[in-house]
Image (tube, helix red, strand yellow):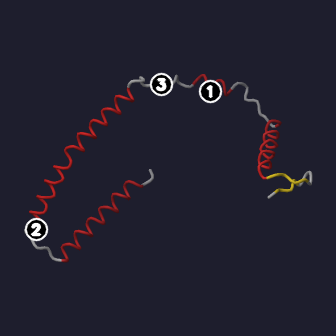
Amino acid sequence: MTIIDPSAGTAIPDDEWLERMLVADARSHRESYVDDDGFTSLVMTALPAPVAASPAWRKPVVTGMWAAAGIALASSLPSAVQDVAREAFLLLGAKPFALSEIAAAVAVLTLASYAAAAVALRRD
């Protein structure tokens, strides 16, 4: 598809029309430049000094610490999950539940989930 340049009446390939418009726009802005009497350089010199960057060794050390914590958690998690599941089964398996109690528990969990999502997604 080609675009017709209205000023010249010639066809312009798709990939060139945007470039031509940007160049023309830059040219028009260059002609209407407003001198700021050194305001920009004054603002740049008044800015605070950049904060020193963290040392190069910090990122690998923090990554290693998180990896060690993750490995420790993953290695202890299977037995902890199994213990919690066993105790929950013993506690919940001993008591019969009515359908209304199950519906109430599902409703409470649903409301809690919606409330948590509302808090997490709010815009301050």
Quarter of image, res 117: bottom left
Q: Which residue is mark 2?
A: 93
User: In the picture provided, is 38 more to the left or to the right than 4?
Assistant: left
Q: Residue furthest bottom?
A: 99
Structural crowding at the residue carrying mark 3, measured as other residues with C-alpha within 10 Å and reported as few (<14), some (14–19) or many (≥20)? few
Q: Nearer the viewer, residue 91 or 39?
A: 91
> Which residue in the structure is indicated by mark 1?
43
Q: State the quadrant of the N terminus.
A: bottom right
Mark 1 secondary-structure assignment: helix
Residue displayed at 19% across by 77% down: 99
Mark in front: 1 vs 2: 2
- Counting residues from the N terminus, which is met first, the one under dot 1 or under dot 3? 1
Question: Disc 3 designates what residue?
Answer: 51
Q: Is residue 20 above or below residue 116?
A: above
Residue 102's disc is none
User: Mark 3 is on which residue type?
Assistant: Val
